[in-house]
């Protein structure tokens, strides 16, 4: 079945550091890929998405590229801020399928 | 405005109380979901409703009783809960099938504390 594996957290960085959160997936079909972010005390918000190979999703300075050859969708940001502290979830949804499959989440803390 | 509204945001209840969580979506979606999020645990999918019919119940104890009167509203009725049921309860909605990168839209959650 479909699955998503994220790098284990927690991740702690200093402000303005470069961020990478790794995400790899297995899927039977041609999934769309998503990154969701959960700020403290809130629900999950869609951060970015990509629907086909080589697509790049971007939002709020975050980027992720759909790499079919490596089955990966790593999240990157060039210079993180304290306000980026949150839990990040990678997810996939197969084309035509109902189920959204989540990774386990990665907690990110940015120190000033 | 996320399009999915959950009330209340916070709820404290005793083990003998009965309370209900409410979720409403304004996105025209035809599927709705309840998730449980406990500290240091993965997201747990509890119930799935498609066109207001329950299609999935992931071995959830009967003290949690969902209700979906129409495609826009979803309730979770709670009674005789245990302290370990304290968690963030998230509602989500979506179109039934993925098309063009459609994911789920989540509400802000209800933080439930059972005392």
Image (cartoon, coloured by chain):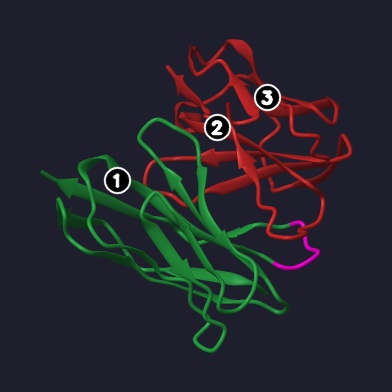
Q: In terms of depth relative to the viewer, which is nearer, B12 or A52? A: A52
Sooner in the amino-acid sequence: mark 2 or mark 3: 3
The residue under label 1 is A84
- Please provide percent x and percent y for residue A37: 44, 47
- Disc 2 and disc 1: Cα gap in Å? 23 Å
Left or right placement of residue B97 versus residue B114 in this view:
right
Chain of the residue under label 1 = A
Instruction: Please give the range of residues in magenta.
Output: A94-98
Q: Which residue is painted at 39% across and 49% down in the image?
A: A60
Q: Colour of chain B?
A: red
Marks 3 and 1 share the same chain: no
The C terminus of chain A, quarter of image: top left
Report the residue at 46% width, 29% height from top.
B86
Chain A rendering hue: green
A26 relative position to B9: left or right: right
User: Considering the numbered disc 3 on the image, is that residue within a helix, a strand or a loop?
Assistant: strand
For mark 2, what is the residue?
B89
User: Does the magenta run of residues contain A96?
Assistant: yes
In this rendering, position of residue A46 left or right of residue B21: left
Q: Main secondary structure of the magenta part?
A: loop
* Residues behind callouts 2 and 1 on a single chain: no
Residue B16 x, y percent position in the rendering? 57, 12
Q: Which residue is mark 3?
A: B23
Label 3 vs label 1, nearer the camera:
1
Which of labels 2 and 1 is toward the front?
A: 1
- Secondary structure type for disc 1: helix
Query: Percent position (x, y) of residue B79?
Result: 64, 18
Q: Residues within 10 Å of mark 1 (few under 14, many from 20)?
A: some
Rendered residue at 49%/86% (across/down)? A70
How far across and down, in percent of the image, does residue A49 sit? 56, 59
């Amino acid at each position: 079945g479909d699955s998503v594996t994220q790098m284990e957290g927690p991740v702690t960085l200093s402000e303005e550091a470069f961020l990478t959160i790794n995400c790899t997936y297995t899927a039977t079909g041609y999934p769309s890929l998503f990154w969701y972010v959960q700020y403290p005390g809130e629900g999950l918000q869609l951060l970015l998405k990509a629907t086909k190979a080589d697509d790049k999703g971007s939002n709020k300075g975050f980027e992720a590229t759909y790499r079919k050859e490596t089955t990966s969708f790593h999240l990157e940001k060039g210079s993180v801020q304290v306000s980026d502290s949150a839990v990040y979830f990678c997810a996939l949804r197969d084309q035509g399928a109902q189920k959204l499959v989540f990774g386990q989440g990665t907690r990110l803390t940015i120190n000033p | 405005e996320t399009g999915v509204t959950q009330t209340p945001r916070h709820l404290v209840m005793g083990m003998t109380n009965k309370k209900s969580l409410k979720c409403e979506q304004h996105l025209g979606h035809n599927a709705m979901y309840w998730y449980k999020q406990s500290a240091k645990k993965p997201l747990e999918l509890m119930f799935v409703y498609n066109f207001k019919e329950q299609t999935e119940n992931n071995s959830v104890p009967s003290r949690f009783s969902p209700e979906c009167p129409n495609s826009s509203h979803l309730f979770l009725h709670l009674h005789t809960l245990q302290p370990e049921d304290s968690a963030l309860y998230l509602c989500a909605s979506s179109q039934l099938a993925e098309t063009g990168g459609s994911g789920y839209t989540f509400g802000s959650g209800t933080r439930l504390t059972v005392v």
